Image: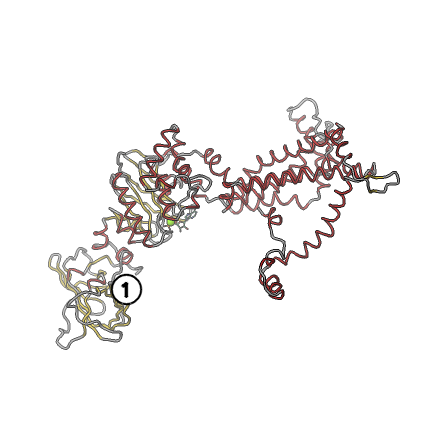
């Protein structure tokens, strides 16, 4: 559960505050005794370059922009009202949520067998599979999106259509490119490692004796998976789903390049509002809604992971 | 529960087509008996047990339970209770759910399950902990839950893989007696893997001593201890002193031998036909006395040695001695024994002696691989 660590980690300086002794002693303990201070540079960096701009952007979403483009008072929630009243915008919201859910569910289903092979296979198999999963990360998302454009191309010359037509599996070329299917396929490809790696890490922590004990007690292999492996790997599954959902919800490049008008997502709309329409407050509103969705999913997964039984698994 | 006989016939396991972990093992465990597979780490005990459970596929050989060959039966249909060294309790289930798991797989109704789980937990005296989760239990309690979980399915046999290895000594001894008692009460044919000779001696009807994948000896505890078949067994179960010796004369089972260092030995049970043998003598059979002037010089079964170390072990004293030709000898003496003479100290020259009956002969092996 490495992803969560930064959120639960203590902020330096809070730990020693309760002990009352000389300021020098406090400082020494903080600096010498505890390694917490080592995250200080990162914290400063994030504050300046991430938290401050992010908060500023969120503030924009409740401000008004005058005709000269200046953003300021009065404070208003009218942008949020507008977002939820115009079906064009809510449609994009639902598309975003739908694509993200479908992507994370399919990723989870595909990732289980891969993660199991990764953990239980012999060294050679493990290395090769790892390479297959990790290698695409070396290629930029944009390049990979263009790759999918070639494969999914809608005419009879699109690689997939060409193969399927020649195999006689289809008689008409499929219209895959510029559809939600294309976005799901592209997102799956790009975010798959984020599902496999936490899952493999969780599966790797399961004592193989547990599965063997289940078998000797009379469970066939599929029941062992459902009753033992699956529940014990939930921490990894929850982490993976959260990651993939968050990343696909915030996707920009994939829907922009292979999504087409029918599958534009919130990220693309933010860009339109800010770059094309130059409506900073409304762009900020959409961005804030996106952030809230991702935060909600993360909060939900933290809750799940904090549940009694999952805590037992993680021990 | 009906007791069944278990037979392994020429069971062999070769890992990766190269390494023979279990080599042509044949043995029989009588119905309701407990057999201990005893041997040093890596000798193939676990592999043997896992083949019986079905978790490892034998390369060749047959496993026969109650007259039926089960070598091709998949694990989940073998109906065996298995205990793992680390207990292998399901951490996401309560104690009761753990015990109920096997019953669920056997499609028992809810009420039957609850009834059987309660009885099984009472059997191991853990009825009051049914709703706990495993991590809230001590090691001993966890192993009891594992035992209940294995017994509740009424297995045809019980397989224990170093089940008590993780417990501390006193708890381990208590659990040994408890498991043995339960096993006898239920008449459950059991194979237990252990590398602890005390555990094997305490619990087993039969002890099978394994070495490098092969069976050295299968016999009762007394037989194994008093009449080890090989030098390895003599060295592995309890301590032994070894003297290479040659026959001088023989009269039926009685024989006169002389060791390589010239000590004459009187042997009452010369069970081998070879002239050159290894004689083993248990340390507790050797008496240590201060060297007196009146001692006969070359009487059989006696020698002169120097005390190198004396270790106090509670009710026992362990003497580490060295004979004049450099041979090391160990002798045990009960602390409370009367009439054994005064305690000898380090550096003393002493007379060691033993009964002719204490001389036990085993075949002389080329590679002297005693433990
Ligand atoms: N899955 C395996 N693949 C290859 N070698 C193995 C495997 N399992 C065990 N071995 C080897 O077989 C030998 C016997 O192992 P094991 O049965 O676990 O011994 P024991 O239980 O007596 O300590 C050891 O040398 C071990 O390294
Ligand atoms: Mg073992």
Instruction: Write down the quadrant of residue B242 in the picture.
Output: bottom left
Residue farthest along the bottom direction in this orientation? B293
Q: Residues within 10 Å of mark 1 (few under 14, many from 20)?
A: few
Residue farthest along the right direction in this orientation? A68
From the image, tell me which residue sits under label 1. B313
Q: How far from the left and from the top, in percent, is residue A33?
A: 58, 62
Residue farthest along the front direction in this orientation? A20
**Front residue of B94 and B271:** B94
Instruction: Write down the quadrant of residue A92 in the picture.
Output: top right
Residue farthest along the top direction in this orientation? A171
Q: How far from the left and from the top, in percent, is residue A237?
A: 56, 39
- Is A284 drawn above or below residue B319 in the view shown? above
> Residue B320: in sight, yes or no?
yes
Element at label 1: loop
- Is A263 drawn above or below residue A25 in the view shown? above
**Front residue of B172 and B189:** B172
- Is A16 drawn above or below residue B312 in the view shown? above
Residue A97 is left or right of residue B103, and the answer is right
> Residue B60: in sight, yes or no?
no
Instruction: Write down the quadrant of residue A40 in the picture.
Output: bottom right
The chain to which mark 1 is attached is: B
Q: How is the image coloured?
A: secondary structure
Residue A235 is left or right of residue A62, and the answer is left
Residue B145 is left or right of residue A168, and the answer is left
**Front residue of B58 and A92:** A92
Q: How far from the left and from the top, in percent, is residue B24?
A: 32, 45
Q: How far from the left and from the top, in percent, is residue B88?
A: 41, 44
**Residue in the image at 36% along x and 46% along y:** B161
């Amino acid at each position: 559960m490495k992803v969560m660590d930064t959120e639960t980690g203590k902020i330096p300086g809070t730990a020693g505050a309760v002990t009352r002794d000389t300021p020098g002693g406090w400082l020494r303990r903080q600096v010498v005794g505890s390694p917490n201070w080592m995250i200080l540079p990162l914290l400063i960096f994030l504050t300046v370059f991430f938290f401050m701009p992010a908060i500023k952007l969120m503030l924009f979403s409740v401000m008004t922009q005058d005709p000269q483009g200046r953003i300021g008072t009065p404070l208003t929630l009218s942008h949020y009202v507008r977002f939820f009243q115009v079906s064009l915008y809510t449609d994009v919201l639902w598309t975003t949520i739908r694509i993200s859910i479908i992507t994370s569910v399919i990723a989870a289903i595909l990732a289980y067998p891969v993660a199991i092979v990764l953990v239980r296979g012999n060294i050679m198999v493990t290395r090769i599979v790892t390479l297959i999963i990790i290698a695409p990360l070396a290629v930029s998302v944009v390049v990979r999106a263009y790759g999918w454009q070639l494969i999914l191309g809608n005419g009879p010359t699109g690689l997939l259509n060409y193969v399927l037509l020649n195999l006689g599996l289809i008689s008409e070329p499929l219209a895959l490119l510029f559809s939600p299917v294309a976005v799901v396929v592209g997102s799956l490809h790009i975010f798959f490692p984020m599902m496999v790696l936490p899952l493999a890490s969780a599966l790797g922590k399961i004592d193989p004796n547990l599965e063997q004990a289940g078998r000797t007690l009379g469970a066939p292999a599929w029941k062992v998976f459902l009753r033992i492996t699956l529940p014990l790997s939930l921490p990894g599954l929850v982490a993976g789903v959260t990651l993939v959902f968050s990343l696909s919800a915030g996707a920009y490049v994939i829907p922009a390049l292979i999504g087409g008008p029918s599958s534009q997502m919130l990220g693309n709309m933010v860009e339109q509002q800010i770059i094309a329409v130059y409506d900073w407050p409304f762009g900020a509103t959409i961005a804030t809604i996106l952030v809230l969705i991702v935060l909600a999913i993360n909060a939900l997964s933290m809750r799940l992971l904090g549940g009694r039984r999952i805590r037992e698994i993680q021990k | 529960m009906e007791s069944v006989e278990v037979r392994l016939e020429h069971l062999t396991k070769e890992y990766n087509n190269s390494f023979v972990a279990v080599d042509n093992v044949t043995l029989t465990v009588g119905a309701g008996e407990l057999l201990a597979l005893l041997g040093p780490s890596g000798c193939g005990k676990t592999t043997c047990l896992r083949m019986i459970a079905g978790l490892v596929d034998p390369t060749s050989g047959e496993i026969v339970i109650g007259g039926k060959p089960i070598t091709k039966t998949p694990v989940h249909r073998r109906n065996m209770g298995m205990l793992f060294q680390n207990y292998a309790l399901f951490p996401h289930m309560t104690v009761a759910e753990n015990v109920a798991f096997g019953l669920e797989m056997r499609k028992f109704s809810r009420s039957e399950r609850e009834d059987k789980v309660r009885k099984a937990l009472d059997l191991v005296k853990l009825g009051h902990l049914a709703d706990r989760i495993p991590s809230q239990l001590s090691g001993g309690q966890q192993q009891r839950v594992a035992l209940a979980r294995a017994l509740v399915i009424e297995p045809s046999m019980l397989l224990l893989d170093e089940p008590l290895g993780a417990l501390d000594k006193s708890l381990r001894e208590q659990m040994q007696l408890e498991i043995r008692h339960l096993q006898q009460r239920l008449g459950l044919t059991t194979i237990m893997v252990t590398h602890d000779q005390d555990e094997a001696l305490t619990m087993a009807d039969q002890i099978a001593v394994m070495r490098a994948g092969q069976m050295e000896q299968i016999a009762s505890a007394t037989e194994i201890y008093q009449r080890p078949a090989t030098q390895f067994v003599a060295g592995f179960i309890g301590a032994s002193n070894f003297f290479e010796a040659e026959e001088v004369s023989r009269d039926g089972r009685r024989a006169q031998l002389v060791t390589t260092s010239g000590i004459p030995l009187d042997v009452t049970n010369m069970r081998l036909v070879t002239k050159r043998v290894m004689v083993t003598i248990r340390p507790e059979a050797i008496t240590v006395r201060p060297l007196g002037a009146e001692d006969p010089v070359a009487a059989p079964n006696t020698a002169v040695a120097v005390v190198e170390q004396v270790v106090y072990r509670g009710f026992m004293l362990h003497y580490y001695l060295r004979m004049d030709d450099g041979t090391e000898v160990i002798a045990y003496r009960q602390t409370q024994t009367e009439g054994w003479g005064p305690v000898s100290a380090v550096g003393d020259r002493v007379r060691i002696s033993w009964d002719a009956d204490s001389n036990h002969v085993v075949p002389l092996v080329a590679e002297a691989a005693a433990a």
